[in-house]
Image (tube, rainbow, N blue to C red):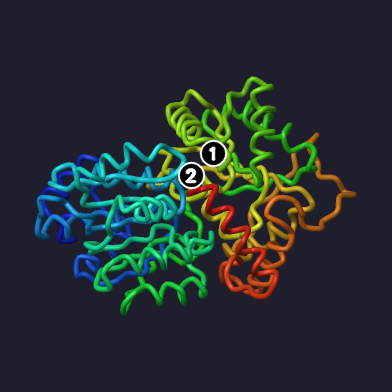
Amino acid sequence: MSFNTLGLSDALLKAVSKQGYTTPSPIQQKAIPLILERKDVLASAQTGTGKTAGFTLPMLQILSQGQQLRQRPIRALVLTPTRELAAQVYDNVKQYSAYLDLKSMVIFGGVNQNPQVATLRQGVDILIATPGRLLDLHNQRLLSLNSIEILVLDEADRMLDMGFLRDIKKIMALMPAKRQNLLFSATFSKEIKALANDILHHPVLVEATPENSTVDAIEQKVYRVAKGLKTGLLIKLISEGNWEQVLVFTRTKHGANKLTQKLNGSNISALAIHGNKSQGARTKALDGFKKGTIKVLVATDIAARGLDIPLLPHVVNFELPNIPEDYVHRIGRTGRAGASGEAVSLVSADETSFLRDIEKLVGERIPSEVIEGFEPDPNASTEPIKQGQGRQRNQRSQSSHSKPKSSNASSGNSGNSGNRNRNRNRNRRRNND
């Protein structure tokens, strides 16, 4: 099948061809015709399979066929959980709309709002935004959502998991009730699907691949190692393997900063990216990593969603995530668009339960080995880690993943524990928005 068979206009086909794409991915084949029929869609596909084009191309087609107004009110809104993902979606929208008379822009927090306001006043057809900045500008009466025809929630499960539900409901109340709604993500728990049904009208569920599956092109590997030897092992793998581009995930911002310092001290160029970094610093780090001037990008889970780094060969879990689904998103930064990649996890004794949950989720045992000189500590406790996002959250994950392919551990809680988790999610949202 080619893009020519999906009902897209010549202008869009020309833009797709310019990007070097000839064959639509499974999620694009299934979702694009449905969206062009103006159906509400809940779409799930493994990361790196072209979900952004899956909603962007038909959205542009619909908008280009509609009535063009001189003042250009905002007609389509794409919401994302992080600034980096918002910027990337905006880049994709610009590329695919190159031959259309449509204007787009991106807004997010962490930067001066004045340039964003100036662009808004010139008229915009498509707005890509994080919820916090969007509501802030609306509350200042600097934008209106009265003309929205299409709403897209990108990484929808993360949006709801990160405490955005209240903001999303506020935003929906500002838009016309009659609109098309599209929810795209790599993972959907049963609880998230239930919440999504409150947003969508008679939705069509599209699943291009099994939920929470990992890309076949990614070679996964676990190194069992003593906790205190992880940094040394990482330096050895990078140096002896001549790795030139490595995305490393840590659990905490402090851990990311500390590891970055140690890598630079070993003559391995590295920068950190996380919610406490200014937007300028985050942009600089990501640009340097993509251009190859920085060998290692050390990140928290802010980089686990949506970042498209072409031909990224190596992803390392310096620490396993507490939430198994996050593993799928982390390693999905490699093995994208048909390319191969390697995902390495450095696992200490206290992460044993995390690894077990991950293997249960993805439905396979990940090959494990030990490197001489970096053996695991036989006396170390296998009790789950209490730092960072907390042991309590891990216990939620374990109870929610008693069956293979189980639901997202971040949903469905109650009582005081639920209140504490919601407060923590709101803090995470503020850091990212």
Q: CA distance from mark 2 to mark 1?
A: 7 Å
Residue lying at 59% horizontally and 36% vertically, measured from the top left? 298
Residue lying at 48% horizontally and 67% vertically, measured from the top left? 188
Please tell me how crowded label 2 is: few (under 14), some (14-19), or many (20+) other residues with Cα within 10 Å: many
Q: Position of residue 113 (x, y in %)?
A: 37, 40
Does the image show residue 222? Answer: yes
Q: Amino acid at mark 2?
A: Thr
Residue lying at 24% horizontally and 62% vertically, measured from the top left? 148
Evaluate if marks 2 and 1 touch, with contact meaning CB atoms under 8 Å apart: yes
Q: Disc 1 designates what residue?
A: 314
In the foreground, 276 or 410: 276
Query: In screen coordinates, is 121 left or right of 249?
Result: left
Please tell me how crowded label 1 is: few (under 14), some (14-19), or many (20+) other residues with Cα within 10 Å: many
In the foreground, 339 or 16: 16
Please say if 178 is above or below 377: below
| Upstream in sequence: badge 2 or badge 1 | 1
Residue 153, quarter of the rendered image = bottom left
Residue 353, quarter of the rendered image = bottom right
Residue lying at 12% horizontally and 48% vertically, measured from the top left? 11
Q: Position of residue 401 (x, y in %)?
A: 64, 70
Does the image show residue 32? Answer: no
Q: Amino acid at mark 1?
A: His
Q: Disc 2 designates what residue?
A: 334
Q: Residue furthest front?
A: 140
Q: Position of residue 128 (x, y in %)?
A: 33, 50
Query: In screen coordinates, is 224 left or right of 367?
Result: right
Q: Position of residue 379 (x, y in %)?
A: 90, 49
Query: In screen coordinates, is 32 left or right of 185?
Result: left
In the foreground, 309 or 98: 98
Q: Secondary structure at mark 1?
A: strand
Q: Secondary structure at mark 2?
A: loop
Image quarter in which the N terminus is found: bottom left
